[in-house]
Image (cartoon, rainbow, N blue to C red):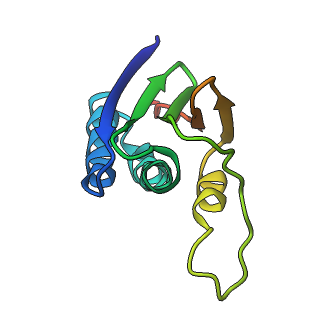
Amino acid sequence: MSLSQQRRFPRRRTSVGASRDFVTGVLIEWELHPLVEDIRLCVSELATNALVHGAPPGREFCVGLHRGEELVRLEVRDSGPGQPTVRCPDNEACSGRGLHLVNELADGFGVDDHIVGKTVWLVFKTPVASLTP
Protein backbone atom coordinates (compact mmCIF):
# COMPACT_ATOMS: atom_id res chain seq x y z
CA MET A 1 0.00 0.00 0.00
CA SER A 2 1.27 3.47 -0.82
CA LEU A 3 -0.69 6.66 -0.23
CA SER A 4 0.34 10.27 -0.74
CA GLN A 5 -1.19 13.70 -0.17
CA GLN A 6 0.32 17.16 -0.34
CA ARG A 7 -0.79 20.75 -0.08
CA ARG A 8 0.79 24.14 -0.73
CA PHE A 9 0.56 26.94 1.82
CA PRO A 10 1.19 30.67 1.39
CA ARG A 11 3.90 32.41 3.38
CA ARG A 12 1.59 33.53 6.21
CA ARG A 13 1.51 32.85 9.94
CA THR A 14 -1.89 31.21 9.61
CA SER A 15 -0.32 28.56 7.36
CA VAL A 16 1.33 26.87 10.35
CA GLY A 17 -2.07 26.08 11.88
CA ALA A 18 -3.45 25.17 8.47
CA SER A 19 -0.60 22.70 7.94
CA ARG A 20 -1.39 21.11 11.34
CA ASP A 21 -5.04 20.77 10.32
CA PHE A 22 -4.02 19.27 6.97
CA VAL A 23 -1.80 16.53 8.46
CA THR A 24 -4.37 15.79 11.18
CA GLY A 25 -7.08 15.24 8.59
CA VAL A 26 -4.89 13.01 6.44
CA LEU A 27 -3.69 10.90 9.38
CA ILE A 28 -7.25 10.42 10.63
CA GLU A 29 -8.36 9.48 7.12
CA TRP A 30 -5.53 6.92 7.02
CA GLU A 31 -6.56 5.70 10.51
CA LEU A 32 -3.16 6.51 12.02
CA HIS A 33 -4.51 8.09 15.21
CA PRO A 34 -1.44 7.18 17.36
CA LEU A 35 0.80 9.34 15.12
CA VAL A 36 -1.38 12.46 15.08
CA GLU A 37 0.09 14.34 18.06
CA ASP A 38 3.76 13.77 17.20
CA ILE A 39 3.31 14.63 13.52
CA ARG A 40 1.19 17.70 14.36
CA LEU A 41 4.00 18.99 16.57
CA CYS A 42 6.64 18.19 13.96
CA VAL A 43 4.79 19.85 11.08
CA SER A 44 4.36 22.95 13.27
CA GLU A 45 8.12 23.16 13.71
CA LEU A 46 8.95 22.47 10.07
CA ALA A 47 6.27 24.81 8.71
CA THR A 48 7.46 27.57 11.05
CA ASN A 49 11.03 27.07 9.83
CA ALA A 50 9.86 27.19 6.21
CA LEU A 51 7.92 30.37 6.94
CA VAL A 52 10.71 32.13 8.84
CA HIS A 53 13.83 30.83 7.08
CA GLY A 54 12.84 29.09 3.86
CA ALA A 55 10.03 30.57 1.81
CA PRO A 56 10.95 34.00 0.40
CA PRO A 57 8.21 36.68 0.39
CA GLY A 58 5.53 35.92 -2.18
CA ARG A 59 6.39 32.22 -2.30
CA GLU A 60 4.73 29.13 -0.86
CA PHE A 61 5.88 26.04 0.97
CA CYS A 62 4.55 22.52 0.47
CA VAL A 63 3.64 19.90 3.09
CA GLY A 64 3.42 16.28 2.02
CA LEU A 65 2.55 13.01 3.73
CA HIS A 66 3.45 9.65 2.21
CA ARG A 67 2.39 6.35 3.69
CA GLY A 68 4.03 3.02 3.02
CA GLU A 69 3.51 -0.30 4.76
CA GLU A 70 5.84 0.47 7.66
CA LEU A 71 6.53 4.21 7.54
CA VAL A 72 4.86 7.59 7.21
CA ARG A 73 7.04 10.30 5.70
CA LEU A 74 6.35 13.96 6.45
CA GLU A 75 7.96 16.45 4.05
CA VAL A 76 8.11 20.22 4.07
CA ARG A 77 9.57 21.77 0.93
CA ASP A 78 10.47 25.42 0.48
CA SER A 79 12.33 27.42 -2.14
CA GLY A 80 14.76 29.16 0.20
CA PRO A 81 18.50 28.66 0.43
CA GLY A 82 20.38 27.21 3.36
CA GLN A 83 20.79 23.90 5.08
CA PRO A 84 18.89 23.47 8.36
CA THR A 85 20.92 21.91 11.15
CA VAL A 86 20.04 20.48 14.52
CA ARG A 87 21.38 22.83 17.20
CA CYS A 88 21.83 22.39 20.91
CA PRO A 89 21.07 25.83 22.36
CA ASP A 90 21.92 26.69 25.93
CA ASN A 91 19.22 27.00 28.59
CA GLU A 92 18.94 30.77 28.13
CA ALA A 93 18.27 30.66 24.36
CA CYS A 94 14.77 31.64 23.20
CA SER A 95 14.89 29.58 20.00
CA GLY A 96 16.82 26.86 18.22
CA ARG A 97 15.20 23.77 19.70
CA GLY A 98 12.75 22.90 16.91
CA LEU A 99 14.87 20.56 14.80
CA HIS A 100 16.29 18.92 17.92
CA LEU A 101 12.72 18.23 19.05
CA VAL A 102 11.54 16.78 15.73
CA ASN A 103 14.70 14.70 15.48
CA GLU A 104 13.85 13.14 18.85
CA LEU A 105 10.18 12.46 17.96
CA ALA A 106 10.78 11.01 14.49
CA ASP A 107 12.35 7.69 13.57
CA GLY A 108 14.41 9.34 10.84
CA PHE A 109 15.30 12.86 9.71
CA GLY A 110 17.01 14.36 6.69
CA VAL A 111 17.23 17.16 4.16
CA ASP A 112 17.16 16.80 0.37
CA ASP A 113 18.70 19.69 -1.56
CA HIS A 114 17.15 20.80 -4.84
CA ILE A 115 18.35 23.19 -7.52
CA VAL A 116 16.00 25.68 -5.89
CA GLY A 117 15.25 25.08 -2.23
CA LYS A 118 15.16 21.98 -0.09
CA THR A 119 12.88 19.36 1.45
CA VAL A 120 13.12 18.63 5.15
CA TRP A 121 11.70 15.19 5.86
CA LEU A 122 10.89 12.99 8.82
CA VAL A 123 9.80 9.37 8.94
CA PHE A 124 7.64 7.71 11.58
CA LYS A 125 7.07 3.99 12.02
CA THR A 126 3.43 3.09 11.53
CA PRO A 127 1.82 1.54 14.58
CA VAL A 128 1.41 -2.21 14.57
CA ALA A 129 -2.26 -3.09 14.28
CA SER A 130 -3.51 -4.70 17.44
CA LEU A 131 -4.49 -8.30 17.06
CA THR A 132 -7.90 -9.33 18.26
CA PRO A 133 -8.45 -12.92 19.40
Q: Residue 28 in the image: state x and y as whole percent.
A: 29, 36
The residue positioned 43% from the left and 49% from the top of the image is 47
Residue 133 in view (yes/no): no
The quadrant where residue 123 appears:
top right
User: Camera-side residue: 83 or 1?
Assistant: 83
The residue positioned 33% from the left and 47% from the top of the image is 11
Q: Residue 13 in the image: state x and y as whole percent.
A: 30, 57
Q: Is residue 102 above or below residue 126?
A: below
Looking at the image, the residue that sits furthest to the bottom is 92
User: Camera-side residue: 76 or 67?
Assistant: 76
- Give the quarter of the figure containing the C terminus: top left
The residue positioned 47% from the left and 48% from the top of the image is 50
User: Camera-side residue: 70 or 49?
Assistant: 49
* Left/right of residue 98 with respect to residue 25 in the rendered view: right
The residue positioned 74% from the left and 69% from the top of the image is 88
Looking at the image, the residue that sits furthest to the top is 1
The quadrant where residue 109 appears:
top right
Q: Residue 32 in the image: state x and y as whole percent.
A: 39, 36
